[in-house]
Image: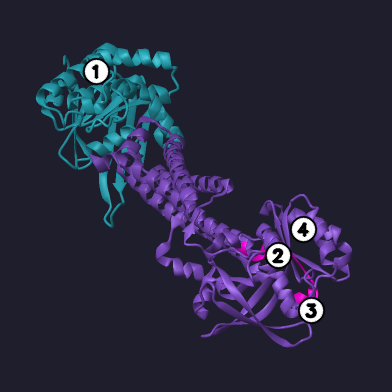
Amino acid sequence: MRSTVIFTSIAVGIIGAVVSDGFMSGMTDQRVNSAIANEVSDIQVHNPSFLLNGEIQYQIPHAGHTMRKIESIPQVKGVSLRMRIQAMAASANAGAGITLYGVNPAAERKVSDLYKHIIQGKYLSSKDKIPAILGQKLAHKLNLDLGDKLIVTVTDSTGTITSGAFQITGIYKTANDRFDEANVFVRKKDLSALIGYPVKSGDEIAIRLKANRQTPVVMKKLQHIFQKEINSKQIVIQSWDQIQPLLKSMIAMMNYFSYIFLVIILAALAFAIINTMLMAVMERTREIGMLMALGMNKRKIFSLIMLETIFLSVVGAVLGLIISIFIINHYATYGFELSSVARGLNYIGYSSRIFFRVNTNFYITSIILVVVVAVMSSISPALKALKLQPATAIRDIQ
Amino acid sequence: MSIIEATGIYKTYQETKVPVNALNGVDLKIEEGEFTAIVGPSGSGKTTLLNILGGLDLPTKGDILIENTNLKTLGSRQLIDFRLHNIGFVFQAYNLIPVLTAKENTEFIMELQKIPKKERSKKAMELLEAVGIADKADHKPGQLSGGQQQRVAVARALASKPRFIIADEPTANLDSRSTNELLEIMAEMNRKYHSTFIFATHDQRVMDKAHRIVTIDDGKIIGDETFEGR
């Protein structure tokens, strides 16, 4: 019974630590992947002044030439030159400040997964007449539906306020309500016609890589290729974590939380082990006293208690590991549904279905720390056993 | 020849505010091959004396010499080692290791003495044979009766080839038949191997078998009789 309590505590400790890490890593992954796939892509190129002022007049010089150079990098999956402009969107009922993107639909499909999130209608195409897609949240806010007209008001190349009407051909929904509420996508040729900038111009190049982990390598290559342009402040190249530093902080914070949880679990585990092993020593006063009386030396008695704890820790750790791997694999495949709090999660940019992930390093660290804590926790009970006097121990039970 | 020589033994317990004087100047010599019973009422100091003779406790005052080794001069580790090689114990509650078989319990002390496996296995079977339960060698304590467990305890006590065996109320938990069988076995060991036995007991049947009866009361020896021919 006592042994069961110890190895079950250890197994539960490991399961708790690993599953909480899996959940938090899954949330982080989901948010980062969603941000890269739908919002920022892996890398973006801008005119430095555009980043300061957000005005479309600060365009990327020689955008076509720059894009071709970027496309020649083997790790690059897609490149899209965008026009990004702040605008006012209005319907018959309401208005809202938005970011309006003019994109080339074919190129944009290679850098953004937004086309996969269309829940009504369809993605931008060359066949439709002045199409626009917008987020479900914005559609609700403006009380708009498919086929309705969306009126946007922008400042054109001459500085004049101008308005244009787009027809809603698609409504998207990502995991991030705030993104859905603030971003409208139209064809670049339609937007350029409205604001008077050449269709081949743009103020943002979005770059999507074949694998997100290649970002640092590609960043280095880009900085090398465009060293002159960067030094002369014609362009600035930013990776996703520079564009959204909050995401990077969030990853660091989640990792930190995982280890805080682990420490809390380990502290609870240490008390459980100390308590259980002290009980074990007290229950075994007779046995320990007898072993001392018969001639077992203190070192062996100390080792006996330590070895028992180590054995139980290892059994508990292996059991915990097996169950953890099973749980993590299950939720990594099918996801963990949090539909009851979906609205809150969507508002802060998270999907309600979390796919767990745990690094091998975390498994190893958890097991090592749990076993170390178990062994350290058994030192005190083992020392208590050594203080028993055989005559007293035997007298107490007779 | 005396194998135990206790001189001026005092033992005072300070566990409460009022000190308890368990032994008040005991002088006792035990000769090799004796079959001695220490008797006296409850609280008279029998167990305390036995613990001191067995090196489980040290006197507050006085000397305890076992074959010229003064136990008071030994450190904690040396005392444990001394007990391992020189003293056998039989406890009232048997105190066998529950997860080990009768044979393994008997081998246990020899294992502590680092006797090779083959030799200790052979010796354990001989001792179990001698105490009459060789057929229960593979039984664990839970599968044995009280009398059988105490026989295993005697075999275990003899396994270390001790200079003497301390038995504190060994028959207290046994029925008459088991008591008689156990006493017969111990008497046989005493005759056959010349093993020295020292009992603390209330049991008249043990006293009837003893060659010497030392009576203790209020921590002092008040009687010491030897019975020839038993």
Q: Between residues A332 and A188, which one lies in front from this camera angle?
A: A188
**Which region of the structure is painted magenta?**
A38-51
Labels 3, 1: one chain: no
Q: CA distance from mark 4 to mark 3?
A: 26 Å
The type of residue carrying mark 1 is Lys
Q: Is residue A23 above or below residue A244?
A: above
Q: Which chain does tag 1 point to? A: B
Q: Which residue is mark 3?
A: A57
The answer to whether B113 appears left or right of A139 in the picture is left
Q: CA distance from mark 1 to mark 2?
A: 90 Å
Count of numbered marks: 4
Instruction: Name the colour assigned to chain A in the rendering.
Output: purple
Give SS at disc 3.
Answer: loop
The type of residue carrying mark 4 is Met
The answer to whether B217 appears left or right of B15 in the picture is left
Q: Is residue A287 above or below residue A327?
A: above
Residue A179 visible to the viewer:
no
Q: Which residue is mark 4?
A: A219
How crowded pointer 2 is (Cα within 10 Å; few <14, some 14-19, many 20+) is rated as many
Residue A104 circle label: 2
The type of residue carrying mark 3 is Gln
Residue B54 magenta-drawn? no
Are the residues at dot 4 and dot 3 in contact (C-beta closer than 8 Å)?
no
How crowded pointer 3 is (Cα within 10 Å; few <14, some 14-19, many 20+) is rated as some
Q: Which chain does tag 4 point to? A: A
Foreground tag (2 vs 4): 2
Foreground tag (3 vs 1): 3
Give SS at disc 4.
Answer: helix
How crowded pointer 1 is (Cα within 10 Å; few <14, some 14-19, many 20+) is rated as some
